[in-house]
Image (cartoon, grey):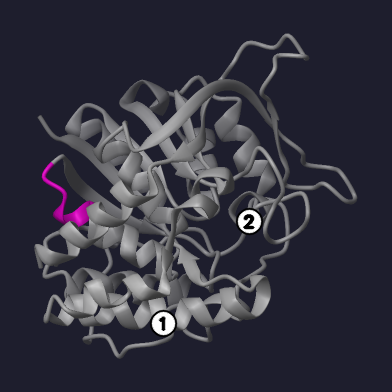
């Protein structure tokens, strides 16, 4: 039995690899792809998503452009990480798929109701998902689960307190975490432990395919930032960890916690406050990722790319 998903993303090197993983996974059926501003402007992330679908030969998947800016705040982007296009590195094919006439929120809502129930997989800022829950108050009954990449139990990556996806739109994240939809949060505590080492990049290149060569090139580009900023010999493919959790729950270890989003702190805005030890005595509302089987994760990615 496959899980019907909508992938909401802001490609992004790790988003692109997450999409390739989802699109070829026999356990998943990608019913739609939606884009959001985050790693770059929504115009650029939409162009990138169209090119990734073309690279994957999955132009049958509907795609819709999402929100151009956060619900309340000014937009912020990560061109220092992902480059001017948002997906710098290897040249990609011209897109052979057009965006839908409807916006991302409308496409998600329609898809969920037509399918009966979907799992949402947001790998960027949660603006589209927050707007979905706000615009369609009845939509929660059509969402089985939200499995998101974002947040952290520990330290952030864009500030000492906050992970980028949550920091961009904490108000939208607050709507998600306070909804009645089951949430699984795959954050930095997982993804930082799932780094692909530089000596493993050639596992993709040696596949001898266009997709394998492209993924290896993305890893090369993405690694330069992480080596300069953190001194890492490898790269975390953050967003693919959320998809991996859906494919094989044994890969990601989770614990139930109450998670709240800080929306007003001067130094802590965007922080996911994870009550791991129950000191607030609040009911747990999230399955929070706390660990990952790194070797199994890397093997899963290589096997997925080998299917192209």
Q: Name the quarter where the C terminus is drawn.
A: bottom left
Q: Which secondary structure class fits the magenta region best?
A: helix
Magenta part of the chain: 22-26
The picture places residue 298, in percent across and down from the top left corner, at 31, 56
Most foreground residue, 36 or 244: 244
| Image disc number at residue 220 | 1
The picture places residue 234, in percent across and down from the top left corner, at 48, 70
Q: Secondary structure at mark 1?
A: helix
Would residue 277 be visible to someone looking at this image? yes
| Image disc number at residue 70 | 2
Residue in the picture at 42% in, 54% down = 239
Would residue 58 be visible to someone looking at this image? no
Most foreground residue, 29 or 204: 204
Left or right? Give the position of 247 relative to 257: left
Most foreground residue, 39 or 127: 39
Position above or below: 305 against 192: below
Compute the Cα span from label 1 to label 2.
30 Å
Bin the neighbour count of mark 2 within 10 Å (Cα to Cα): few under 14, some 14-19, many 20 and up.
Answer: many
CB atoms at circles 1 and 2 under 8 Å apart?
Answer: no
The picture places residue 206, in percent across and down from the top left corner, at 17, 79
Left or right? Give the position of 65 relative to 304: right
Residue in the picture at 65% in, 52% down = 163
Q: Please, which residue is most extreme toward the front here?
A: 199
What is the quadrant of residue 121 in the picture?
top left
Q: Secondary structure at mark 2?
A: loop
As for residue 89 lying within the magenta part, the answer is no
Instruction: Count every numbered label the image shows and give the total.
Output: 2
Residue in the picture at 29% in, 59% down = 19
Bin the neighbour count of mark 1 within 10 Å (Cα to Cα): few under 14, some 14-19, many 20 and up.
Answer: some
Residue in the picture at 64% in, 80% down = 228
The picture places residue 290, in percent across and down from the top left corner, at 53, 35
Q: Nearer the viewer, mark 1 or mark 2?
A: 1
């Amino acid at each position: 039995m496959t899980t019907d998903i909508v992938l909401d993303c802001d490609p992004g090197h790790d988003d692109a690899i997450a999409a390739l993983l989802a699109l070829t996974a026999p356990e998943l059926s990608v019913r739609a792809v939606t884009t959001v501003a985050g790693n770059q402007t929504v115009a650029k992330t939409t162009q990138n998503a169209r090119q990734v679908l073309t690279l994957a030969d999955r132009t049958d998947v509907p795609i819709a452009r999402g929100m151009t800016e956060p619900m309340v705040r000014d937009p912020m982007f990560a061109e220092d990480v992902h480059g001017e296009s948002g997906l710098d590195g290897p040249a990609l094919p011209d897109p052979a798929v057009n965006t839908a006439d409807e916006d991302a929120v409308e496409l998600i809502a329609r898809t969920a109701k037509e399918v009966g129930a979907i799992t949402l997989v947001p790998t960027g800022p949660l603006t589209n998902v927050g707007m979905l829950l706000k615009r369609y108050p009845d939509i929660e009954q059509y969402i089985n689960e939200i499995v998101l990449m974002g947040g952290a139990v520990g330290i952030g990556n864009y500030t000492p307190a906050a992970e980028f996806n949550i920091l961009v739109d904490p108000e939208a994240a607050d709507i998600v975490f306070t909804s009645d939809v089951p949430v699984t949060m795959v954050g930095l505590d997982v993804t930082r432990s799932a780094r692909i080492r530089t000596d493993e990049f050639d596992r993709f290149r040696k596949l001898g395919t266009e997709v394998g060569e492209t993924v290896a090139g993305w890893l090369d580009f993405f690694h330069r930032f992480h080596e300069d900023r953190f001194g890492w010999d490898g790269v975390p493919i953050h967003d693919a960890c959320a998809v991996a959790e859906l494919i094989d729950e044994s890969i990601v270890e989770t614990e139930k916690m109450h998670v709240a989003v800080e929306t007003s702190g001067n130094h802590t805005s965007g922080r996911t406050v994870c009550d791991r030890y129950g000191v607030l005595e609040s009911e747990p509302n999230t399955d929070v990722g706390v660990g990952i089987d790194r070797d199994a994760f890397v093997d899963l990615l290589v096997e997925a790319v080998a299917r192209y």
